[in-house]
Image: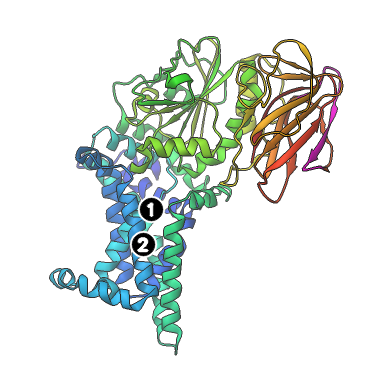
């Protein structure tokens, strides 16, 4: 079927991509990314007339198409903030919620919009007809951030480059229809349930107030990262449904659709042969980067100055649930292998208009505790230089600057880590640097990743003497987010090595605390853990790895007293 469709073109439009776009839209509805909007769709459907579900579907699909293709460009041309429309939509949901909870306000709004509704030939917004459904559907399109596969990624990239054609528009419409149809069905069910309950004595008012409460809570939650974190906490279960987007015929047509003069040869080779550690030629450089985060004074990085390092280039965007679920692994690899020569560069290429706001990106980088450099790729310069089509996408570059491996989407973390180790010259398969220990960071984490070697150290509460054994005296108290040493320690550039009577004191705020540790040659060690004066289970460290020291019910703050056997190296602390 796919092969047959791949040869069919109507009005110079690829029929295969249209069909696959619709299937991809349905897969998006089935993904965890839809979870935050499901209660909102149900809530706005339970009140109002029979035409409201159709209005919601039309508003959602129409607004999604317009926003995907034009929103960022129009806002930039008008000099308006890229997150303006999203903020307006959140405010609108809150206003509708208040109107449902307080009938007097709903009636006032009804009178206010009466002339507009009359001219439009529709009932009042508070009456819940088709027109109000369109408005609510458009608002949902503004706050929903669907998981993007190759189809939506290609459309978003082409929109950012102002390369809109009939084919791109039709693909976007097909995607929107596929994603909206199941939501329309949910809206119909909610509307019918609301109509039934409205006929039950005293139930109508309760339904109205419950719907208003759901909208108010949703409006508040959409100002936070809770909806994204909720979706990220659910395992990705739609990979098999998205395989149609990754079929060879579809991938070939997408490359034709997005083909440009940019040097995408390395990315194409990696995409077709990922996982073999062959040599696919020189890696494209970072291009068109508008801002650098987590580099000294915001200085740009180039691949030429990273020559001699193993570089992992991670394409991501901060509202992408799939990307968020990969962050603990990226952070774990950076903590474990950075001192061996691994550099990770996160290329933040925005999918939605509000992701163009650098302040939003900076907040996400800080909240997730990302310490490696992040390149803000607002204009898709690096995305196109690589010919990339995925969020997330990871490309591995060897010490000579050649692309050696690539992985798209979540999963195969062991394979990526083994490739990192091989390029670093560490033979064999090592323990997972993150594995099941690390969870997606939450808003309760206040202490960021803390390095102990002098190269990146910024968290000591006392002066340290580098590159020599020194007997440290424990202070009477340790400030928040600071580390203190007691006993004999040697503080080197990338790690600290314990001597006789070595203790480490750390006052931190997070439910979970992890340490990257390495035992001395020839055997495992046991770390003594005491938190807030209470002795916890000792942690055995048989290998160079990341170890969880404590998992507490609250973020604290807490005080760690870590007893470290002689010869043991500590590199950094991370939190979850």
The question of residue 521 being in magenta is answered with: yes
- At mark 1, the secondary structure is helix
Q: Which residue is mark 2?
A: 93
Q: Position of residue 384 (x, y in %)?
A: 35, 26
Q: Position of residue 450 (x, y in %)?
A: 63, 29
Span colored in magenta: 518-533
- At mark 2, the secondary structure is helix
What's the distance in space between the residues labelled 2 and 1, CA to CA? 10 Å
Displayed quadrant of residue 423 = top right
Residue 264 in view? yes
| 362 and 257: which is toward the camera | 362
Total residue callouts:
2
| 25 and 354: which is toward the camera | 354
Q: Residue furthest bottom?
A: 201
Q: Which residue is mark 1?
A: 143
Quadrant assignment for the C terminus:
top right
How are the residues colored?
rainbow
Disc 2 and disc 1 in contact, CB within 8 angstroms: yes
Q: Earlier in the sequence, mark 2 or mark 1?
A: 2
Q: Position of residue 166 (x, y in %)?
A: 21, 42
The question of residue 458 being in magenta is answered with: no
Q: Is residue 160 left or right of residue 389?
A: left
User: Vertically, is 192 above or below 368?
Assistant: below
């Amino acid at each position: 079927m796919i092969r047959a469709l791949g040869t069919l073109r109507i009005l110079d439009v690829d029929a295969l991509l249209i069909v696959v776009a619709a299937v991809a839209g349905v897969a998006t509805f089935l993904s965890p990314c839809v979870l935050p909007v499901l209660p909102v769709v149900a809530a706005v459907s339970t009140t109002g007339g029979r035409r409201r579900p159709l209005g919601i579907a039309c508003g959602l699909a129409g607004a999604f198409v317009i926003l995907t293709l034009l929103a960022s460009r129009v806002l930039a041309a008008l000099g308006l903030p890229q997150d303006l429309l999203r903020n307006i939509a959140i405010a609108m949901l809150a206003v509708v919620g208040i109107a449902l909870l307080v009938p007097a306000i709903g009636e006032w709004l009804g009178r206010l919009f009466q002339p507009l509704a009359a001219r439009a030939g529709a009932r009042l917004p508070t009456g819940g007809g088709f027109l109000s459904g369109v408005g609510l559907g458009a608002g949902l399109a503004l706050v929903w951030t669907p998981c993007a596969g190759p189809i939506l990624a290609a459309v978003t990239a082409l929109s950012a480059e102002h390369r809109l054609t009939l084919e791109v528009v039709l693909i976007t419409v097909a995607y929107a229809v596929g994603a909206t149809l199941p939501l329309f069905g949910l809206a119909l069910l909610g509307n019918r349930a609301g109509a039934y309950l409205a006929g039950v004595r005293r139930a109508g008012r309760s339904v109205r107030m419950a719907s208003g409460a759901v909208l108010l809570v949703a409006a508040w939650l959409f100002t936070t990262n809770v909806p994204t974190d909720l979706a990220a906490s659910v395992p990705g279960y739609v990979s098999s449904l998205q395989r149609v987007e990754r079929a060879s015929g579809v991938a070939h047509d997408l490359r034709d659709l997005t083909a440009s003069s940019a040097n995408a040869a390395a990315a194409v080779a990696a995409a077709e042969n990922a996982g073999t550690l062959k040599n696919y030629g020189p890696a494209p450089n970072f291009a068109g980067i508008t801002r650098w985060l987590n580099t000294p004074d915001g200085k740009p990085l180039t691949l030429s100055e990273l020559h001699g390092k193993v570089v992992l280039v991670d394409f991501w965007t901060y509202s992408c649930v799939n990307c968020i679920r990969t962050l603990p692994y990226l952070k774990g690899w950076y903590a474990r292998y950075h001192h061996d020569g691994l550099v990770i560069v996160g290329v933040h290429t925005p999918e939605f208009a509000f992701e163009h706001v650098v302040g939003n990106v900076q907040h996400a980088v800080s909240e997730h505790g990302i310490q490696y450099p992040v390149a803000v790729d607002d204009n898709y310069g690096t995305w196109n230089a690589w010919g990339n089509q995925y969020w997330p996408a990871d490309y591995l570059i060897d010490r000579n600057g050649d692309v050696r491996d690539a992985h798209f989407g979540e999963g195969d973390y062991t394979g990526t880590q083994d490739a990192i180790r091989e390029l670093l010259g560490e033979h064999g398969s090592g323990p997972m640097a993150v594995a099941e220990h690390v969870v997606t960071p939450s808003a309760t984490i206040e202490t960021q990743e803390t390095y102990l070697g002098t190269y990146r150290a910024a968290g000591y509460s006392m002066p340290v003497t580098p590159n020599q054994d020194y007997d440290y005296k424990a202070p009477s108290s340790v400030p928040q987010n600071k580390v203190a040493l007691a006993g004999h320690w040697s503080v080197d550039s990338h790690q600290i090595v314990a001597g006789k009577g070595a203790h480490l004191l750390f006052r931190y705020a997070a439910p979970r605390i992890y340490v990257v540790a390495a035992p001395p040659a020839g055997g495992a060690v046991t770390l003594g853990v005491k938190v807030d004066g209470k002795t916890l289970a000792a942690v055995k460290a048989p290998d160079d790895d990341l170890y969880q020291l404590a998992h507490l019910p609250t973020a604290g703050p807490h005080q760690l007293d870590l007893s470290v056997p002689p010869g043991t190296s500590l590199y950094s602390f991370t939190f979850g």
